[in-house]
Amino acid sequence: MLSQQSPCAPEFVTHPLSTYLLRELRSDHAGETGAVCIYKGIEAVAQWRGDAELLAFAKAHGATEADHLTQVAQWLPASQRSRLLGPLRLAGWLTGAFPALFGRRAVYATIAAVETFVDHHYQQQIDHLQACGGPEGLLPLLVQCQADEQHHRDESAALAGERLGVFLRAWCWTVGWGSSAAVVLARRI
């Protein structure tokens, strides 16, 4: 019978970055890479459409995501980064550009869906670090990233409004599912 080892077992917490934390940071790095590209996709379409409000939204949120990416990258050795960054960049760009073709409300609902997933993803890591400990400085970084993502989620949800049509709800479900699948892949590859 295989024994299930606790993620807080000594070999996980005695190294600066445990196997668990390397996998999670790999997924964070991939996710923030995708997020930067989501906003670049929104920017491209907003610029093409001449939508100054949406362009300002994308630039402001994109700057926050770029900062997250820089900070997470400082924690993750280059050799540990996902090999799927190219496809994730494309998927991110399309995840931003596609709803932007349909207008602001579709963009806001998309961002709310993505950030809902990201909030839960960061919370799992925060819970782990609070229970098991980790390298000094990592927990405050993840808490700050989560707070920024929660702000993006709440702002976007308010802008999208409460009543989303069936197609927009289906799109948002697909975006949430895609975010989850991307994390699973980025942890491994």
Image (cartoon, helix red, strand yellow):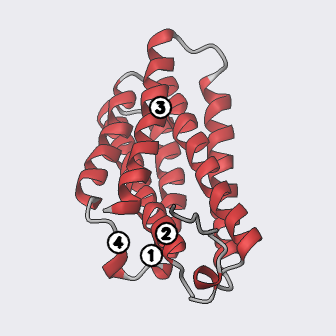
Q: CA distance from mark 4 to mark 2?
A: 8 Å
> Badge 1 is on which residue?
73
Q: Furthest residue to the front?
A: 1
> Badge 2 is on which residue?
25
Circle nearer the N terminus (2, 3):
2
Amino acid type assigned to the residue bearing label 1 in the image: Ala
- 99 vs 16, left or right, is left
Regarding mark 4 in the picture, which secondary structure is present there? loop
Regarding mark 2 in the picture, which secondary structure is present there? helix
Viewer-nearest of discs 3 and 4: 4
Viewer-nearest of discs 1 and 4: 4
Amino acid type assigned to the residue bearing label 3 in the image: Val
Q: CA distance from mark 1 to mark 4?
A: 9 Å
Coordinates of residue 73 in the picture (x, y in percent): 44, 75
Rendered view: 16 above or below 105:
below
Q: Furthest residue to the right?
A: 130
Q: Residue at x 39, y 30 (%)?
A: 100
Coordinates of residue 17 in the picture (x, y in percent): 54, 82
Regarding mark 3 in the picture, which secondary structure is present there? helix
